[in-house]
Image (cartoon, rainbow, N blue to C red):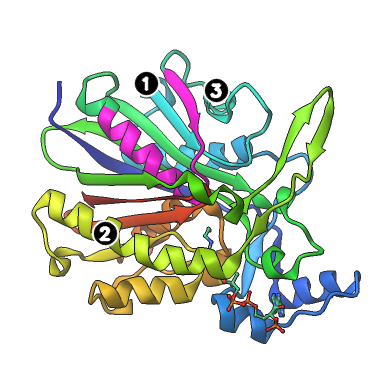
């Protein structure tokens, strides 16, 4: 049994179809709804997002991200004994997107399951994978965030449809004698289910309710800035580290203003924050592994550095992971 789990490779994938804010302005105008590049950039920091084409599913985006992550780790699919996919936009009601992905990758035989914690999903999935590796249940895991939020957006609601995008990110997490993941901290507060939800379900072959994203933006914003600071301080304290030990903040990419507020509270200059929200929008569970991969592939995030990953989202859920790359 190994004492630690460690990220040995990262990968990501964005579907090719890119929509600028100007494209969103034009799309909403067809329904007589007004928005503007200025509003979207000023309130969220978002300039563009990617949308998957019809017939493409979360598992398809995940396959690309996982293949890149496996290549970076120098591992083959046959060595993978655990796949956890964080998603709120699964391919089907069941089986899990993780099982569908496992089949597509040819990584047969290990455990595979989905984690549903909306935008905190990747932090939850990494926490679970770390625990399974530390207890000896797995040695080589793929931990994935994959989303096609464009399918659950209400294009009549300008307050939400301009914020989200599609994408996938993945890491290979392996058993290791050196750290690795230093500490994790995950939480939920089920009193706030209605604050951010997709209130629909399948019943008798039909969809019951309204399966489109609803968000009380300002309420989410207020809760988010508080709990993200709490989670960051919790992982630092559990690992016996302080703010100045953090080399990179790799946050969930929901809104530049939330990210700036968290960085300020942790006394981290924005030069130490990986930002992708401008070009990706909010890709929910995929946003943290996407940002991590962008940071690694750009050469900024390097082996041996200390990273703080943190997310917040529907549920209400939130959490953080502190790790040495
Ligand atoms: O990933 C999960 C976690 N999610 C988040 O962290 C999201 C957190 N919340 C936010 O990021 C922000 O609350 C939003 C970006 C969603 C909204 O920003 P805001 O500064 O809270 O704006 P608001 O909702 O208070 O709306 C301000 C105004 C309203 O008009 P009035 O009532 O002041 O006349 C809206 O109707 O902006 C209007 N508005 C828009 N105007 C142009 C809302 N959406 C748009 C739009 N274009 N797309």
Taking the magenta stretch, the answer to whether it contains residue 204 is no
Q: Is residue 264 above or below residue 192?
A: below
Would you identify the image quadrant in which residue 58 lies? Answer: top right
Taking the magenta stretch, the answer to whether it contains residue 129 is yes
User: Cβ–Cβ below 8 Å for labels 3 and 1?
Assistant: no
Point out residue 126 in the picture as x, y percentages from the top left corner: 35, 40
Mark 3 or mark 2: whose residue is earlier in sequence: 3
Point out residue 236 in the picture as x, y percentages from the top left corner: 17, 56
Task: Label 3: state its secondary structure.
Answer: helix
Q: Is the CB of the residue bearing disc 1 within 8 angstroms of ligand 1?
A: no
240 and 316: which one is in front?
A: 316
| Residue at 71% from the left image edge and 63% from the top image edge | 161
Q: Say whether residue 93 is left or right of residue 206.
A: left
Q: Which residues are magenta?
A: 111-131
Res 152 seen here:
yes
Which is more foreground, mark 2 or mark 1?
2
Point out residue 64 in the picture as x, y percentages from the top left corner: 54, 41
- On residue 99, the disc is 3
- On residue 272, the disc is none
Give the dominant element type of the magenta stretch: helix, strand or loop: helix
Q: Alpha-carbon distance for marks 3 and 1?
A: 12 Å
The image quadrant where one finds ligand 1 is bottom right
Q: Alpha-carbon distance for marks 2 and 1?
A: 30 Å
**Residue at the spot of label 1:** 81
Q: Say whether residue 323 is left or right of residue 165.
A: left
């Amino acid at each position: 049994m190994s004492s630690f789990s460690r990220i040995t490779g990262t990968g990501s994938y964005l579907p090719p179809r890119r929509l600028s804010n100007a494209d969103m302005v034009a799309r909403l105008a067809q329904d007589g709804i007004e928005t503007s590049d200025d509003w979207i950039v000023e309130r969220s920091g978002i300039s563009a997002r990617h949308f998957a084409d019809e017939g493409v599913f979360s598992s398809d985006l995940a396959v690309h991200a996982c293949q890149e992550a496996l290549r970076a780790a120098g591992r083959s699919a046959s060595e993978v004994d655990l796949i956890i996919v964080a998603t709120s936009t699964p391919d089907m009601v069941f089986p899990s997107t993780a099982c569908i992905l496992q089949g597509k990758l040819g990584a047969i035989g290990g455990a595979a399951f989905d984690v549903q914690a909306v935008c905190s999903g990747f932090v939850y999935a990494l926490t679970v994978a770390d625990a399974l590796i530390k207890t000896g249940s797995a040695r080589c895991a793929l931990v994935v965030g994959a989303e096609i939020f464009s399918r659950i957006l209400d294009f009549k609601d300008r307050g939400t449809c301009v914020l989200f995008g599609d994408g996938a990110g993945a890491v290979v997490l392996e058993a290791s004698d050196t750290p690795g993941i230093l500490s994790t901290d995950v939480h939920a507060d089920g009193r706030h289910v209605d604050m951010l939800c997709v209130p629909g379900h399948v019943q008798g072959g039909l969809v019951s309710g309204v399966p489109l994203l609803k968000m009380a933006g300002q309420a989410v914003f207020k809760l988010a800035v508080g709990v993200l600071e709490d989670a960051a301080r919790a992982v630092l304290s559990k690992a016996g580290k302080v703010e100045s030990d953090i080399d990179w903040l790799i946050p969930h990419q929901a809104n530049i203003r939330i990210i700036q507020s968290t960085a300020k509270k942790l006394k981290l200059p924005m030069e130490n924050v990986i930002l992708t929200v401008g070009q990706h929008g909010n890709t929910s569970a995929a946003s943290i592994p996407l940002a991590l991969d962008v940071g690694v592939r750009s050469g900024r995030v390097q082996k041996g550095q200390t990273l703080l990953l943190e997310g917040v989202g529907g549920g209400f859920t939130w959490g953080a992971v502190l790790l040495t790359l």
